[in-house]
Image (cartoon, helix red, strand yellow):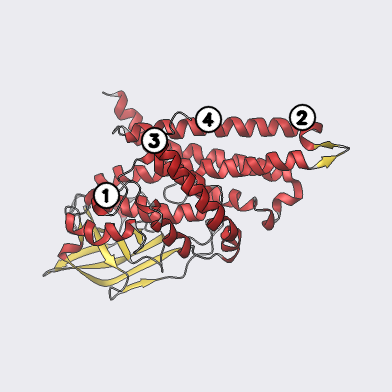
Amino acid sequence: MWYLTEERELMRNVAREFVEQEVKPVALELDKKDEFPLRLLKRAGELGFLGITFPEEYGGLGGDWTTLALVTEEISKVSPTLAVVMGAHSVLAGGILNVLGSHEQKLKYLAPAAKGEIILAMAGTEAAGGANYGEFTTRAVLDGDEWVINGTKLFITNIHYADIYIVVAVTSPPDAPKAAHSLFLVPKDAPGLELGKPENKLGWNGSSTGTVYLRNVRVPKENMLGPEGKTMLPFYFSATDEFMICGPMALGMAEACYEKAFQYAHERMQGGKSMYDKYEVVRHKLVNMWIEIEALRGMVYTAIAKRDSGQMILGEGRALKIKGYRVAEYVANEAIQIHGGLGTIVDTGLERFWRDAKVLAIGGGSIEALTEDIANILKREARK
C-alpha cells in the first residue's frame, strides 16, 4: 500500500495483535450484553492508541492521522463499538481539547486522556438537533469566579464512564441577535451533573450513549475551554476529524464482512461445488463488494494524506463518513444475504456489522446534514 511506511506498519501490527488476542475473544459477548469496553479502552491507552495524533508533550505519540486511520480500521474489523468509544474520547473530545486547550488544561486533562487514565466525553447534541446550534438552550452564566450551567444534552457517548464532559453552552445574553457558544470542562462529580440511563440502541452496543442533565452546575472560570463565545468555528473544523475517522472505521467493518462472506462462499458446498464456483450471482456479489471496498480505501487514505500534509479537507472529511456508511451497510447486507439464514444469527457475527453501519449514518452527525455541509462548502469554493 502506498500509504504504508515502516513506522505505520509497525503500529498497524501492534493493533492487529491487540485485536486478535484481546478484542476478538470478547467482542461478540460485549455486543450481546451491551457492555462498555472499559478494559479494552484502558488497554488501548496503554498501547498509545488514544494519543496517536497528540503532541508528545501532552502524553501523545506525535504521530499522524494515517497511523490513527490504520489502527481504527483494524479495530473496526472486530469491534466497531470500541472504535466509536475511542473516537468519542480522543478524536472528538480530545481533539477539541488539543485545539483549544491551554497549556495547563492539556497537562491536566489531555495528557492522562492520551494514556487512558481518564475518559472524555463531548456533550454537544440537544433536542433541537446535533447541528442546530442556534436553537441550543443549554446556557452558562458567569457568577463571580464561576460559570453556572443549566441544560440537557442528548445522545452523549461514554456517559457513566467519562471523567470529564466537554459541554457546549450559550454564553451570550438572551436578547443577543445571535447566540454565542462556549465550551466548558465539567468533571463527572460536579454537583448538579446527572446522567440518564444508557439508551438501548439498534447498534454500537456498549458505547454507553445517553442523556446528560446540568442543573446549576458550577465550574471555575479556568474550566472554560477556548475563548468565550468564539468556539463554534474551531469546533466546526475539529469535527471534520471525527467525520473523517468514520471512513477507516467503515472500511474495517466492510472488510470484515467481505472476508466472512468470501470464506463462507468457498466452504459452503452445494451439489458437489462451493457456492463460489456454482453460482455466478454469488461471485458477482463478492466482486461488487470488493470494488466498493477498494474505492473506499482509496478515498479514505487519499483524503487523510491531505490532512497529514496540512490541507483542510472540510468536504472530503465529511464525504468519508457518507461514503463509508454506504459501503459498510451495502457490504454487510450482501454478506448476510450470501450466508442466508445463518447471516441473521447473532452468533455468526455478521448482523451486528449491519446494525452498526446503520447507526453510523446518524450518530455523530447525520449523512443528510453532512451532505448539506458539503453543498455549502462546494458553493463557497466555486466563488473563489
Q: Measure how far apart labels 4 and 2 are at the Cα level.
A: 22 Å
Q: Position of residue 286 (x, y in %)?
A: 67, 34
Looking at the image, is mark 1 or mark 4 nearer the viewer?
A: 1
- Crowding near the residue tagged with mark 3, few <14, some 14–19, many ≥20 C-alpha atoms within 10 Å: many
State if disc 3 and disc 1 touch (CB < 8 Å).
no
Q: Which residue sits at x=75%, y=38%?
A: 266
Looking at the image, is mark 1 or mark 3 nearer the viewer?
A: 1
Q: Earlier in the sequence, mark 2 or mark 3?
A: 2
Q: Measure how far apart labels 1 and 3 are at the Cα level.
A: 21 Å
The one nearer the camera, 114 or 342, is 114
Q: Which residue sits at x=32%, y=48%?
A: 61
- Crowding near the residue tagged with mark 4, few <14, some 14–19, many ≥20 C-alpha atoms within 10 Å: few
Q: Earlier in the sequence, mark 1 or mark 3?
A: 1
Q: Earlier in the sequence, mark 3 or mark 4?
A: 4
Q: Which residue sits at x=55%, y=31%?
A: 294
- For the residue labelled by badge 3, is the local secondary structure a helix, a strand or a loop? helix
State if disc 1 and disc 2 touch (CB < 8 Å).
no
Q: Earlier in the sequence, mark 1 or mark 4?
A: 1
Point out which mark residue 56 bears: 1
Q: Measure how far apart labels 1 and 4 are at the Cα level.
A: 34 Å
- Crowding near the residue tagged with mark 1, few <14, some 14–19, many ≥20 C-alpha atoms within 10 Å: some
Q: Amino acid at mark 3?
A: Ile
Task: Name the residue carrying label 3.
Answer: 304
Task: Name the residue carrying label 4.
Answer: 295
Looking at the image, is mark 2 or mark 1 nearer the viewer?
A: 1
Q: Amino acid at mark 1?
A: Glu
Task: Name the residue carrying label 2.
Answer: 280
Point out which mark residue 363 bears: none
- For the residue labelled by badge 1, is the local secondary structure a helix, a strand or a loop? helix
State if disc 4 and disc 3 touch (CB < 8 Å).
no
Q: Amino acid at mark 4?
A: Ala
